[in-house]
Image (tube, rainbow, N blue to C red):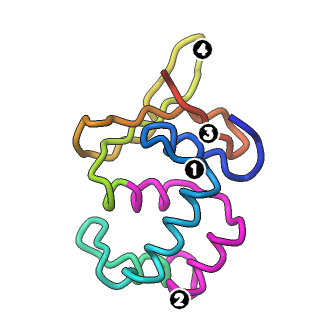
Amino acid sequence: MPADGDCLFWALGYYYDERGPELRKILSKYIRQNGKQIKINDISFSDWIEWSEGISYKSYSDRLRDGLWGGALEMALFNAITGSAISVWEPRDKKLVRIAHFEGDDKPHCHLVYMGRNHYGVLV
């Protein structure tokens, strides 16, 4: 996974045959068009952004489009849009430990590995 700021998008895109930078654009556009309708745990995405970032969902969409690193909020968004389950694993003491999980369908179930320093990869 390239360390180009798009690693989360490359990792998620792997399961949908989508390039990282393109998936970033797709999610950014989706936020801009649907930010008030998308629900994460029964709370609108626009409210999540205002609470966590202190900006509008449209401003957040622009920041994401322009290179904002992805994390848990973007995984939750991807999960809400696709319905795909997402599990995030981290290497610890010579084994993998699941550190996050987003419920969804197993077609596909996206398994990501968090390698520290805000870097994600695909776990295959």
Please identify the quadrant where the N terminus is shown: top right
First-in-chain label (2 vs 3) = 2
Numbered disc in front, either 2 or 4 = 2
**Closer to the eye: label 4 or 1:** 1
Q: Does the magenta stretch include residue 55?
A: yes
Give the structural element (helix, strand or loop) at label 3.
Answer: strand
Q: What's the residue at 33%, 46% (across, down)?
A: 102
Cα distance between the residues tagged 2 and 3: 26 Å
Residue 35: image location, x then y, percent:
40, 81
Label 4 vs label 3, nearer the camera: 3
User: Residue 96: image x %, image y %?
Assistant: 50, 20
Q: Which residue is denoted by mark 1 in the rendering?
A: 9
Q: What residue type is labelled 3?
A: Tyr
Question: Which residue bears the numbered disc 2?
Answer: 56
- Mark 2 is on which residue type? Ser
Tags 4 and 3 in contact by the CB under 8 Å rule?
no
Relative to 42, does residue 81 appear above or below in the rendering?
above
Placement of 58 over or under 19, stated as above or below: below
Which residue in the structure is indicated by mark 4?
93
Magenta-drawn segment: 52-78
Give yes or no for residue 62 being in the magenta stretch.
Answer: yes
Earlier residue among tags 2 and 4: 2
Q: How crowded is mark 2: few (under 14 residues within 10 Å), some or many (20 or more)?
A: some
Real-space Cα separation, disc 1 to disc 3, in angstroms: 9 Å
